[in-house]
Image: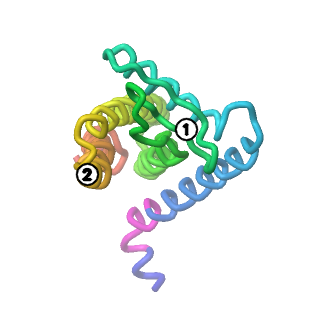
Amino acid sequence: MKELLIKYKSVTRFVFTFLIVYVVLSMAYKFYLKFSEGSSFYPDYMTHIVAIQSQDLLNVLGYNTIVVPHPDEPSMKLIVNGKYVARIIEGCNSISIIILFVSFIIAFSGNLKETIVFVLSGSVLLYAVNLIRIVILSIGLYHYPWRSDILHQVIFPGIIYGMVFLLWMFWANRFSKLTKRNE
């Protein structure tokens, strides 16, 4: 076993670092969610902000949109032109996907400055793409409600996870220490 760990030291280090960072960030996020219970920003600050920003973007695009707290669950109801089209839940705020992204980048780290810049810029890009995803999904659900399953479960997760994958590949091929060491 020891020989395998030595032989695959870089893989072992990657997996171990990824898991540690992912667990620490996930636990911090869970603490944040627990701390957010009962706050004035329902259901939590980030989900609330994503809902408000989605509303604002839809209004800019000409859709009369409001978001209101859901009375029966921790989410925000998104109402477009008087029609309830979607709910924005904690999973829609992009934090979980950003935690996954950051964990990979740190596990495959480059030099400190490049890593910090890429983590910050990639996180902002993922947040923005997620907002655009919610807006397009909401428009799709408004106009084509019978396509909700394919829109919500296939196309739009593909967009956000596809973006994460592209960022990972760009990072791994361009900036990581492992790539630079193998050149």
Q: Along the horizontal axis of the image, is 94 left or right of 164?
A: right
Q: Is residue 9 magenta?
A: yes
Which of labels 2 and 1 is toward the front?
A: 1
- Along the line of sight, which residue is nearer the eye, 119 or 64? 64
Note whether 65 is above or below 134 in the view shown.
above
Position of residue 102 measured from the top left corner of the image (x, y, whole percent): 47, 44
x, y (%) of residue 94?
46, 41
Picture residue at 23% right of the left edge, 41% below the top: 144
> What is the chief secondary structure element of the magenta stretch?
helix
Of residues 42 and 182, the one nearer the viewer is: 42
Asked which secondary structure carries label 1, the reply is strand
Amino acid under label 2?
Answer: Asn
Q: Are marks 2 and 1 in contact (CB under 8 Å)?
A: no
Label 2 residue SS: helix
In primary-sequence order, the first of circles 2 and 1 is: 1
- Please give the range of residues in magenta: 6-14
Viewer-proximal residue, 98 or 147?
147
Residue 21 in sight here = yes
Residue carrying label 1: 76
Q: In this figure, which residue is indicated by the disc labeled 2?
A: 182
- Residue 181 visible to an observer of this rendering: no
Figure colour scheme: rainbow
Residue at the spot 24% in from the left edge and 53% down from the top edge: 150
Position of 21 compared to 180: left or right?
right
Q: Position of residue 139 (x, y in %)?
A: 29, 32
Point 42% across, 82% down: residue: 3
Locate residue 133: give its quadrant: top left
The percent coordinates of residue 10 (x first, y second) are 40, 62
The amino acid on which the numbered mark 1 sits, given as a three-letter code, is Met
Circle 1 residues within 10 Å: few <14, some 14–19, many ≥20: many
